[in-house]
Amino acid sequence: MINLAVENIKCGGCASRITSKLQEIEGVEKVEIHVEEGSVALLLKDECDDVVLDEVKGQLKVMGYPLAGTVHGLESAGAKAKSFVSCAIGRMSDD
């Protein structure tokens, strides 16, 4: 498993949305979200597939969950706002 420390994971809604979006990426076999640790664990079909890993990182950033320490200032504030929306969508899809 590949572990990625990410920002802005707050709850099960966040976890649900992240899981559903990352499982749509071809090459991703399994996704585990660890809310308390703020991390995403991935099992890829090919663990050395940098293209898939870059796509995962990009998708996380688009949803507001960038890798820890990679965004600052206004970009960080924008990521937090995006994560609130992603979280809300995740909560609604859990119902």
Image (cartoon, rainbow, N blue to C red):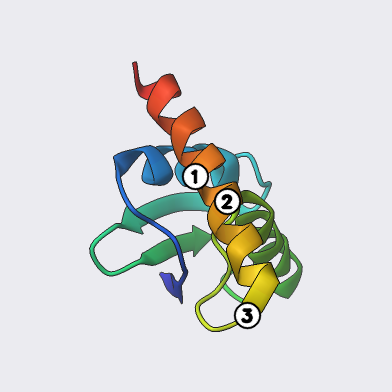
Which quarter of the rendered picture does the N terminus lie within? bottom left
When asked about the image quadrant of residue 12, the answer is: top left
- Picture coordinates of residue 87, whole percent (x, y): 45, 40
Residue on which the image places disc 1 = 84
Residue on which the image places disc 3 = 72
- Residue sitting at x 34%, y 15%: 95
Spatial separation of the CA atoms under disc 3 and disc 1: 17 Å
Disc with the residue nearer the chain's start (3 vs 2): 3
Task: Name the side, left or right, on which 93 lies relative to 53.
Answer: left
Residue farthest to the top?
95
Tag 1's secondary structure?
helix
Q: Amino acid at mark 1?
A: Phe
Residue on which the image places disc 2 = 81
Tag 2's secondary structure?
helix
Residue 20 visible in the current orientation: yes
- Picture coordinates of residue 25, whole percent (x, y): 66, 46
Q: Amino acid at mark 2?
A: Ala
